[in-house]
Amino acid sequence: MTNSAFLRVLNGERVNPPPLWIMRQAGRYLPEYRELRTRAKNFLDFCYSPALATEAVLQPLRRFQLDAAILFSDILVVPDALGRKVWFVEGEGPRLEPLIGEEHWRFDEVERAIQRLAPVYEAVGRIKGSLDANTPLIGFCGGPWTVATYMLQGQGGDKERARRVAYERPLDVDRLLDLLAEMSARHLAEQVKAGADCLQIFESWAEGLPPLQFERLIIKPTQKLIQRLRQIGVATPIIGFPRGAGAEISNYAQRTGVTALGIDTSVPKILAPHGMPVQGNLDPLLLVVGGTALESGVRDVLERFSGAPHIFNLGHGITPEASVENVARLVDLVKGRA
């Protein structure tokens, strides 16, 4: 993929205009996605259908000149594969049977869990075979702490319950994070084996942690995940996205082993080590608002990261309310066609 601007940036090259992809670019803002979603009984079935997942990935690429594709799946296939019941409530989000309140935490073996995720890896292969030669495919997983939070409290929202149990049951939580680091490394390795060209770790809930907890719950598990991935033999670039990390973001970039740093909307300037590729960080609301606000926001991001290897993206996932026309306008602005 010598002509892939996305992979060239991940190798440390400054490309102008920067490559562009959008977190959750396959999603509910697209009418064709909403129709496709009706073909599955529930969201997990959608994720486990290689045919539906492949079609979801290809839909935004047919509309927009995007520089990378990303696997259609969910970070919670990992606890589902480990034997924890996962389901999705329409309009509310994911639910799990919470570990909090259980005296003994039991999980299925990693080998069995990987076997259960075979449909995901089949989807990776199908997607890769459907892309043109210069469109790389991103595989992904959730960060260990983000996935653990869902498992501990059974849902998203306020993370206070998960943080509290991390203090109250430190050995159990540390073992859970070790398990998730191992499972996630194996999960990512299988995606690379199936055809993924790059990987992203979504640590969506890195916010609000004091330094000692950030070290224990974010830095160390991510280090273990990436070290294990490299030990397996995976040399693929890895983008780390510690959403809400704040002042800890440079620490995360320097110590976890990530290749590139995804930054959220709140990060005002480059905080990555010198030369590290940066990904981000347009406010997703601008794809709802559009107009001059969108134009100003795009110009601001392009200017702020003009001195670094940069992948243009949002500071979080695109929202269902985003306008298809505004996404097309974004692409034109970034590509210099407007």
Image (cartoon, rainbow, N blue to C red):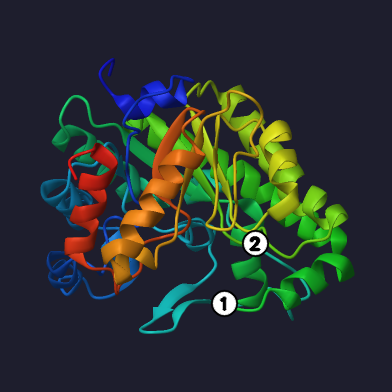
Q: Which mark is residue 155?
A: 1
**Residue lying at 29% horizontally and 31% vertically, measured from the top left:** 136
Query: In this orientation, which residue lies closer to the viewer: 114 or 320?
Result: 320
Q: Please name the amino acid that badge 2 sits on.
A: Ala
9 to the left or right of 130: right
Q: Point out the image quarter for the C terminus.
A: top left
Query: In this orientation, which residue lies closer to the viewer: 247 or 320?
Result: 247
**Where 107 sits versus 304, above or below?**
below
Q: Residues within 10 Å of mark 1 (few under 14, many from 20)?
A: some
In the rendered image, is residue 77 in sight? yes
**Residue lying at 33% horizontally and 42% vertically, measured from the top left:** 121
SS of the residue under disc 2: helix
**Residue lying at 33% horizontally and 27% vertically, measured from the top left:** 16
What x and y, as percent, mark residue 127? 22, 41
Q: Quadrant of residue 196?
A: top left
What x and y, as percent, mark residue 280? 46, 46
In the rendered image, is residue 115 in sight? no
**Where 189 sits versus 203, above or below?**
above
Residue marked by disc 2:
148
Query: In this orientation, which residue lies closer to the viewer: 294 or 327?
Result: 294
Q: Please name the amino acid that badge 1 sits on.
A: Gln
Q: Residues within 10 Å of mark 2 (few under 14, many from 20)?
A: many
SS of the residue under disc 1: loop
Q: CA distance from mark 1 to mark 2?
A: 10 Å
**Residue lying at 37% horizontally and 55% vertically, measured from the top left:** 296
Q: Earlier in the sequence, mark 1 or mark 2?
A: 2
